[in-house]
Image (tube, coloured by chain):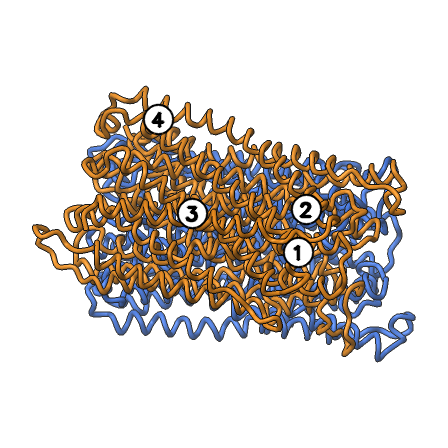
Chain colours: A orange, B blue
Amino acid sequence: MGVEAVLAVVLAISLLSLAVAFFLARQVLAADRGKPEMEAIAAAIREGAEAFLSRQYRTIGGLSVVAAAVIFGFYYLNRSVPNIAEMGRGTAVKVTLSFVVGALCSAIAGYIGMFVSIRANLRTAAAAMTSLNKALQIAIRGGAVSGLTVVSMSLLGVGGLFYLFGGAHDYEHVPLQIVGFGFGASFVALFAQLGGGIYTKAADVGADLVGKVEAGIPEDDPRNPAVIADLVGDNVGDCAGRGADLFESTAAENVGAMILGVALYPVFGMGGIVFPLLARAFGLIATIVGVFTVHCREDEDPMNALNRGYLVTTVIAMAGFAAAVFLLLRPAPDAGVEVHRGYLLFAGIIGILTAYAFVWITQYYTEYRYRPVRSIAEASKTGPATNIISGLAVGFECTGLPVLVISAALMGAYWCGKQALGDMTGAGLYGTAIATMGMLAPCAYILAMDTFGPITDNAGGIIEMSKQPEEIRHKTDRLDSVGNTTKALTKGYAIGSAALAAFLLFSAYLGEVTKITGLKMAVDLTRVPVFVGGLLGATLVFVFSALAIKAVGKAAQVVIAEVRRQFRENPGIMKGTAKPDYARCVDIVTAAALREMVVPGLLAVLTPVAVGFGFRFLSPYGQIGAESVAALLMVGTIAGILMATVMNNGGGAWDNAKKYIESGEFKVDGQVVGKRSEAHKAAVVGDTVGDPFKDTAGPSLHVLIKLLSTITLVLAPLFIR
Amino acid sequence: MGVEAVLAVVLAISLLSLAVAFFLARQVLAADRGKPEMEAIAAAIREGAEAFLSRQYRTIGGLSVVAAAVIFGFYYLNRSVPNIAEMGRGTAVKVTLSFVVGALCSAIAGYIGMFVSIRANLRTAAAAMTSLNKALQIAIRGGAVSGLTVVSMSLLGVGGLFYLFGGAHDYEHVPLQIVGFGFGASFVALFAQLGGGIYTKAADVGADLVGKVEAGIPEDDPRNPAVIADLVGDNVGDCAGRGADLFESTAAENVGAMILGVALYPVFGMGGIVFPLLARAFGLIATIVGVFTVHCREDEDPMNALNRGYLVTTVIAMAGFAAAVFLLLRPAPDAGVEVHRGYLLFAGIIGILTAYAFVWITQYYTEYRYRPVRSIAEASKTGPATNIISGLAVGFECTGLPVLVISAALMGAYWCGKQALGDMTGAGLYGTAIATMGMLAPCAYILAMDTFGPITDNAGGIIEMSKQPEEIRHKTDRLDSVGNTTKALTKGYAIGSAALAAFLLFSAYLGEVTKITGLKMAVDLTRVPVFVGGLLGATLVFVFSALAIKAVGKAAQVVIAEVRRQFRENPGIMKGTAKPDYARCVDIVTAAALREMVVPGLLAVLTPVAVGFGFRFLSPYGQIGAESVAALLMVGTIAGILMATVMNNGGGAWDNAKKYIESGEFKVDGQVVGKRSEAHKAAVVGDTVGDPFKDTAGPSLHVLIKLLSTITLVLAPLFIR
C-alpha cells in the first residue's frame, strides 16, 4: 500500500468514526427524558458542568497561549543553532502550530465527551424506568461518543499534520515537528485532569463531611447545597479529565511510534511510519462493532454485557492489527534484511494480553470478592487506624503484580522485536513499540466503558434526588456499581498503557537526541548529574502527589464553609421548605479547584525544563542536560507508575471495603453488621482518605508521566549545546 | 605516614574507644539504682529484652549460617571462573570469613548497646530523683557506650581483616575480599531492625488499642499486661536495631571507600586506601570529647546541652578530617598529577553541612513549632480522615527539601573532586566519597544521641509505673521529649548518610565489575532489561514497605488477643488486686515478631539475587545481569530514600500533631482543647498509623538500601558471564 493510500484510509475511517459518534449522540439525545423533576435536576448538573468547563478552558487557554509563545520563542531565537536549523525551515511555526492544534483537539475531545455525558445521564435515568437493557445501551453509547471522538480526533490531528507538513516527502523531519501535538495534548490534559479531579473530590468530601457526618442526611439528598456540585464533579473529573488523558495517550503514542518508524525507515520505508495510524484506525472499527453488540437481559449482570462487547472489540482489533502488520511492515525490496512478521504480531498480542492482565489485577485488588479488600474490612473492626494501615499496606503491596506483568511484557516484546528484526539497532525497542500499539488498539472501547461510569452515577443521583420508586433506584444502582468497576478498570488500563508507552516515548526522545548530536545516547545512572536527574524525577512524583492531595483538602474547606453557612443562614433548607443555593456551591468549587490546580500543574511542567536548562548551563557538565532530563523522565516514570498504582488501587480498595461492610455479608462476632456500625464508621474514614488518591492524584499522575515525555521531546533540541 | 603506622594508629584509637566505652559502662552501672519497686520494673524490662534478643539472634544466626554456606558454595564452585580466580587463592574462605565476622560484629554491637541501655534506664530514673544534669549525663553516657562500640568495632573489623588478609601487600584484591564484612553486617542489621521494629510497634499498638482505647487506662499503667512488652520494644527496636543499622552504615561505607581508594592507587598509593579508617578514627576521638562535655543547668533545656556536645564533636571531627586529608591524600611522587587537597577538604565539609541540613529539615517537618505539624493538627478538627490526608500530604511533600540538599551535595562534592583531581577517571566520584566520609565523621556521637532516646523513654516509664512524685515525673518527661527529638534527628541523619553512601557503594560495585570484565561499566536505562531492573528495584521498596507494615498489624493482633484474654480470665487485674502476666505478653510478641520478620527480610535478600542470576542466564541478554542489578540497586535506592523519608517524617509529624493538641496551645473556635477532645481522638488515629511507618518500615528501609549495595558487591563476580 502506498503511503497516500494509507493516509486516505486512515482519514476515511476517522471521519466515519466521527460520523458514527454523531449518530450515536443524536440517538442518545432523541431518547425519552423522563419526568420534569428529573429534567430540572439534570439541567442543574448540565449548567454547573458547562460553567466549570468554560471557566477551566479560559484558564487553561491562557496558560496554553503562554506556553505556545515560549515554545515559539525558544525555537525561533535558536533557529540558527545547528540542532534546530537541521530540522528544516519554518520549524518554529510548525512546532508551535502542532502544540496549538494538540491543545485545541484535547480540549474539544474533553468537551464533546462531557457534552454527551451530561445529557446521557438523564436519558439513562429515564430509560431505567422501563428497561435495564435500554438504560445500559444509552449509557454505553453515550460513552462511545466520547471514546470514538477522542481516538478519531487524535488520528485526524496526527495524520492531518503529517500530511499538511508534507510528511510523505520529508519523513525525517516532520515527525519531529509534530511532537508539539503530543505536548499540547498533555499540557491541556494535565490541567483538565487536575482541575476536574480537584473539583470532583472537593465537592464530594465537602458534601459528605457536612451533609452525611454533621447534618446526618443521606448521600444525594436534595437538601444538601453541595449535592449538585458533587454530581457535576463526576462529569468534569471523569469525562472531561479522563477524555483529555486518553486523548493525549493516543496522540503521544502515535507520534512516538511514528518517530520510531523513522528510525526504521531503511527497513520498512514509509510503511513503518504510518503503521501506527492504520493499526489505530482498525481499532476504531473494532470499537464501533463492539459497542453495537452490547445488550443484556433484564436479569443479567450488566457487567457481562460490557465484557462481551470488550471481547468482540479485542478480537476484531487483533485481526485489524494483524492485517496492518502484514500490509505495512514488509521490508523494502532493497533493505536486504529478513523480517519475521509473525513475531511482530506476537508482540502486539503481548500488548493485548497485558491489557487483560491489568484489568484482572485491578479487579483482584479492588473488588470485595477477594482477599485484599476483605482484609481492609476486617481491619476496620479495630477502628479507623487499623483500617488506614491495612489500606496503605494493600496499596503499597499491589504494585508488585502489575510491575511483574509490565516487566514480562517489556522483556517479551523486546525479545519478539529481536527475533523479528535480528541484531539491527532498535530491533528490541520496536518490539516494545508494537506491544504498546497492541495494548492501545481497543482504547476507544475502554474509554466508552470509562465514560459509562459518570453517566450511570449521575443517572442514579437523578433518580434518587427526584425520589423515584425503589425498584427503579435498584436498577440504576446496579448500573452504578458496574460503572464503579469500569472506572477502576480503566484506570488500571491507563496506567498499564502509560507504562508501556513510556518506553516508546523514551526511545523517541533518545532517537531525536541521537539525530541531533550524532552520538549514541545512553542514560548512564553512574554519572552523578544523571543520577541526580533521576532522583529529582522520582521526587517530582512524590511532591506532585502531595500538592494534588493538599489541593483537594484546601478546596474542600471552602465547600464546607459554604454549606455550613447556607444551613446556618437559611434554616428552611433542612426543614425542606426552602431550596438551597446549588449554583453558589458550584461556583465556589469551580473557583477553588481552578485556583488550586495551577501550582501542581506548573511544578510538573517547569521541573523538567529547569533540570534540562540548569544542567545544560552548569559549566563542568556540558552536553549532559539531555541525559539528565532523560533520567528524570525515566526514573520519574517508574516512580509515577508505582505511585499511581498505589493511589488508584488503594483508593478503590478502601471504597469497596466500605461497600463490603454495607453489603450485608460482613460479620462481627458472627453477627451481620452494616451501616452505622463502628466498623462502618472506620471504613468511611478510609473511603474518604482514598477519594483524593483515586480520583485526583492517581489519574493526574498518568498524565504527568506522559507530559514528562512529551515536554522533553519538544524541548530536546534546546537541552543540547 | 606508612600504611603500617596508619593501621597501628587506627587500631590504637579503636581499642582506646572500646576502653572508654567500658569505662562509661562501668560508671553508668555503678550509679544509684533507686527504689526497689523501680528495680523490679527495670528487671522485667531487662529480662524481656534479653529474652527477645537471644531468641532473635538464634533465628538470625540460623539464617546467617545458611547465607554463609551459600556464599561459600557460590565462590568455591566458581573458583576456576576467571572473575573469581583473578581475586586470588582462598577467596571463597576469605569472603565467607568476612561475612561471618561482619555478622558477628553487628550482632555484638547491637547487643552491647542494648546491654547498657536496659541498665542505664533505671539509673537515669534514679538520678532524675535528685538532679536533671545527672540523669542527662547517665543517659548520654549510656548512649555513648553504644556509639563508641559500634564505630570502633566496625573499624577493628575492617582494619583487622585488611591487615589479616595482607592488604598492605595485596591492596588490589583484599578490599574485594572483605566486601563480605559489609554484607554480613547488613544481613544481620536488616533482620535486627525488622524484628525489633515489628516487636516495638506491635507491642505499642496492642497495648494502646486494648489498654487506652478499650479499657480506658492511661499509657504505662501497670495494670496493662502489655506494658512491659511496650517498654522492652523501645530497647530492641531503637537500641539493638539502630545499633546494627549504623554499624553496617559505617562498615559498608568503610569498605566502599577503601575499594574506591584502590581505584585511585596510582595517585595516592596506600594513603588513599587507608584514609577512610584514619578519618573515622579521628571521629571517635571527637565523640569521646563531645560526650564528656555534655552537662546542663537544672533549668535549662537538655536539648541545648546535647547540641553543644554535637557542636564540639563536629569541630574536632573536622579538624581530624583535615589532618587525615593532608597526611594521607598526597600524590605519590611518581604519580605525575597535581592534587588540590583544599577541594577534598571542602568536599568533606559539604558532607558535614549536609548532616546539619538534614537535622534541620527533619525538625522543620516533625516539630510542632512549624507549619507542617500544625497543618495536621488543624486538619484533625474535621476528623480522622482529614488528619490522615493531611499527614500523608506532609509525608509526600517532605521529600522535596532533602532531595534538593542531597542533589546539591552530590553535585557540589562531584565538582570538588574534579577540581581536586582534574580530569582523571573517577575524580568526581571520589569527591562524593569524601563528602560521605565527612558526613559520617561524627557518627558515634549521633548514635549516642539516638540511644539516649529509649533510655530516657524507659526511665519515664519506670518512674510512671512505680508511681513516683509528680516533680520527678516532670523531669523525666523533659528528658523523654528530648529523646523523641534526638530519635527523629538520627533517622534524618541515617537516611541522609545512606543516600550519600549509596553513591559510594555504587561506585565500588561498578569498579569491581569493571575490574573483572575490563570494560567500562555503564548503567544505561535505555536498554530494556536495565530499565526493567530499575523498575523492579523501586517496586521492591514499595512491596517491602507493605510487608513490614502488615507484619506489625499481624503481630499486634496477637498481642490484642492476649491482653483481652488476661483481662477476661483474671478480673483482678483491672481492680489492681492481681498482677498481670507480663512475661507471657513479652513471649508472645517475641514469637510473633520473629515469625513476621522472615518474609520481608528474605524478599529483600532474594530479589537482587534473583534479578542478577535471572538476567544473567536469560539467553538474549548475556552479560547484562550485572548492569540490570546495578539499575535495581540505584533506582531502588532512589525509591528507598524517598519512601523512608515519607515514613520517618510522616510518622513523626503525626506523633507531634497529637502532642501539639495535648500541649495546651491548641485552640478550636478560640477555646483551648486537649486530650479527650474530638480533634485529639482524630490525632490519635494519625499517631497510630504513623507508628509502623516511623519505627518499622522507615528504619528498615535504611538498612534495605545498604543491603542492596552490599549484597550486589559480594555477588558481583557471579552476575557476569
Query: How far is disc 2 from disc 4 in space, using C-alphas?
Result: 55 Å
> Callout 3: helix, strand or loop?
helix
Q: Which residue is at a point 73% across and 72% down the rendered structure image?
A: A664
Of tags 3 and 2, the one toward the viewer is 3
Residue A671 image position (x, y, % from top left): 78, 76
Q: Are marks 3 and 2 in contact (CB under 8 Å)?
A: no
- Going from N to C along the chain, the mark reached first, 3 or 2, is 3
Query: Could you tell me the amino acid type at mark 4?
Result: Phe
| Badge number at residue A617 | 4
The residue identified by callout 1 is A125
| Badge number at residue A42 | 2
Query: How far is disc 3 from disc 2 in space, using C-alphas?
Result: 26 Å
Query: How far is disc 1 from disc 3 in space, using C-alphas?
Result: 26 Å
- Going from N to C along the chain, the mark reached first, 2 or 4, is 2
Label 3 packing within 10 angstroms: few (<14), some (14-19), many (20+): some
Q: Is residue B40 or residue B510 the one in the foreground?
A: B510
Query: Could you tell me the amino acid type at mark 2?
Result: Ala
> Callout 1: helix, strand or loop?
helix
Q: Are marks 2 and 1 in contact (CB under 8 Å)?
A: yes
Figure quadrant of residue A463: bottom right
Q: The residue marked by circle 3 belongs to what chain?
A: A
Q: Which residue is at a point 92% across and 71% down the rendered structure image?
A: B575
Figure quadrant of residue B225: bottom right
Query: How far is disc 4 from disc 3 in space, using C-alphas?
Result: 51 Å
- Going from N to C along the chain, the mark reached first, 2 or 1, is 2
Q: Can you say which quadrant of the picture contains the C terminus of chain A?
A: top left
The residue identified by callout 3 is A19
Residue B343 visible to an observer of this rendering: no
> Callout 2: helix, strand or loop?
helix
Whether residue A20 is situated above or below residue B434 in the rendered picture: below
